[in-house]
Amino acid sequence: MGDAPRVPLPEAMTFDPVRFPGLAQDEVWPPEAFDFAAPWLSDEALAFERGPSGEIIFVRRLEAMRLVLDIETAHSALDIPSGSRDFRLLRLMPSALRLVESVTPGDPVPPTLRGAPLPPPDEHQLYVATTALVAALERGAGEAGGAFLNALRRTAPGVHMFEQAAARCISEGGYALERMAGLAKGLHRLARAHAEVLGAHAAQPDYPGMERMVKATTRVLVRDAGWSGDLLAHALRQIDPLVATPRETAESLRLSAVAMLEGEATLGAATRLAAAQAEHRDRLIELGIFWRRLAAAWASVHPQFTDRREIDALCRNILRRLALKALYRTA
């Protein structure tokens, strides 16, 4: 008997709408820009960046000040009232910094965080993918393939590096135009497909931030005698060990794409592998669409002051997404 047919997933953009805590009835969130009201957060010389360990760094341009912030307590350090609009803008920062290198007050909120498609992969992601591809293809490349890979190593990284490497092989090595053009096209497609996997993984929602906030909220409610036996506290205890599922799925998909490139890459398999990489990319993009708004909404929670009905709604959002088993398949 064959495998049972997979149940199709619901439409990601319209599934189970998520409401950010503390919003006014008709307020749209995320907003168009990081337009802080606090005057000390409206200076164009300021910026937010992500540190090497994922922490948020508050930077004053042209000066030596670099303040490392725990985003869960940053509002206190910056004298921002919890639950205010500035508080919610500040809590959007980790999600935004997964999509852009830095945020200056007044900058637009990244379009992807507002529901737009992911942008094309960055040049550095294409370079990383190309480097991995060249290393994987060294075995069994043949004379023409080996010449092309050598030329690729000597070509400056960029969008046109495959065509330039092919041209070098034709002009310097005397190889046939058709052969080199075919190699360039196939390998460019594969490298771009893998770069799109890397880009889709790098732009995944702020899962670690969501996990930390679920744990922090669980701790507060469980310690509160008035809530420790409540259904909400019970739901949080159930969710706490499961909320890592999307992050673990995203990492499994990335590792699977990398292993595929390292273990199966040959010049003759470029087209097949590009299609397989594209499938992994689509899975990562779909995962991100289902979870991006919810992860950012959890970042807006203050465990002590957020309305318990809003936390309950976010718990329901998590449980509904976790129930979509097909979203987390790894094979």
Image (spheres, rainbow, N blue to C red):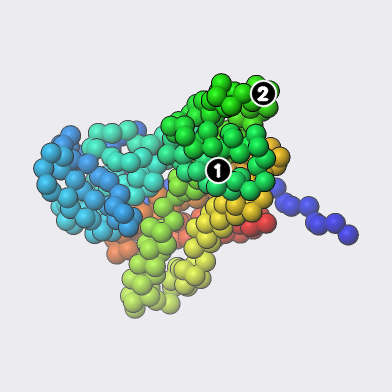
Residues under labels 2 and 1: Cα distance?
A: 21 Å
Residue 175 visible in this rendered orientation of the protein: yes
Secondary element at image label 2: loop
Instruction: Assign the N terminus to one quadrant of the image.
Output: bottom right
Residue assigned mark 2: 176
Q: Please tell me whether residue 88 is drawn above or below residue 243 in the rendered image.
A: above
Q: Position of residue 197 (x, y in %)?
A: 54, 44
What residue is shown with label 1?
134
Q: Nearer the viewer, residue 151 or 306?
A: 151
**Residue that protrudes farthest toward the right in the picture:** 1
| Residue 185 is at least partly visible in this image | no
Q: Report the residue at 50% width, 29% height from top.
A: 161
- Which quadrant holds the C terminus? bottom right
Direction from residue 203 to residue 42 in the image, left or right: left
The amino acid on which the numbered mark 1 sits, given as a three-letter code, is Val
As shown in the figure, which amino acid type bears the numbered disc 2? Answer: Ala
Residue at disc 1, secondary structure? helix
Mark 2 touches mark 1? (CB < 8 Å): no
Callout count: 2
Which label's residue is closer to the chain start, 2 or 1?
Answer: 1
Residue found 70% across the figure and 42% down from its top: 269
Task: Say above or below: 232 vs 138.
Answer: below
